[in-house]
Image (cartoon, rainbow, N blue to C red):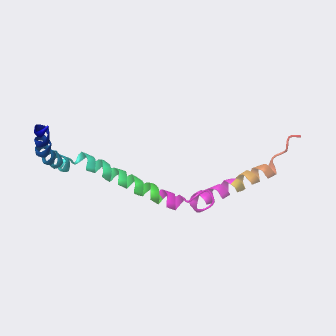
Amino acid sequence: MKNLAIKCYVYSPLRLKQFAKNQKGVTAIEYALIGVAMATLLAFILGDQNSGFLGALKTTFDKIAEAINSVTIPKN
């Protein structure tokens, strides 16, 4: 048991140094943060179904559908 404690004591700082030098995880985290920032920005710009760009697009398509329905002949 004493031997295991000594090994853990010796290897822990070595493994922490290796972990600190590893840049692969840092790059992945940076890309994830950029993705989250872009998604937040797009959600803010586009808005929901009733406001923003998506709301204006929905309103426009509703007007187009209403205009088409007003000129078509109903099937009775």
What is the x, y in percent for residue 11? Answer: 13, 43
Q: Is residue 11 magenta?
A: no
Q: What residue is shown at x 14% (from left), y 42% (from top)?
A: 5
Q: Is residue 43 magenta?
A: yes
Residue 8 falls left or right of residue 43 = left
Residue 65 falls left or right of residue 47 = right
What is the x, y in percent for residue 57? Answer: 62, 56
Q: Quadrant of the C terminus?
A: top right
Image quadrant in which you'd find residue 38: bottom left
Residue 52 falls left or right of residue 75 = left
Q: Nearer the viewer, residue 71 or 24?
A: 24
Q: What residue is shown at x 63% (from left), y 60% (from top)?
A: 50
Q: Nearer the viewer, residue 67 or 44?
A: 44
Q: What residue is shown at x 48% (from left), y 57% (from top)?
A: 42
Vertical side of 19 occupied by 57: above or below: below
Q: Quadrant of the N terminus?
A: top left
What is the x, y in percent for residue 28? Answer: 31, 48
Range covered by the magenta-colored residues: 42-61
Residue 4 falls left or right of residue 43 = left
Q: What residue is shown at x 75% (from left), y 53% (from top)?
A: 66
Vertical side of 76 occupied by 46: above or below: below
Give the total of numbered labels. 0
> Magenta: predominant secondary structure element?
helix
Pick out the residue farthest to the front: 1
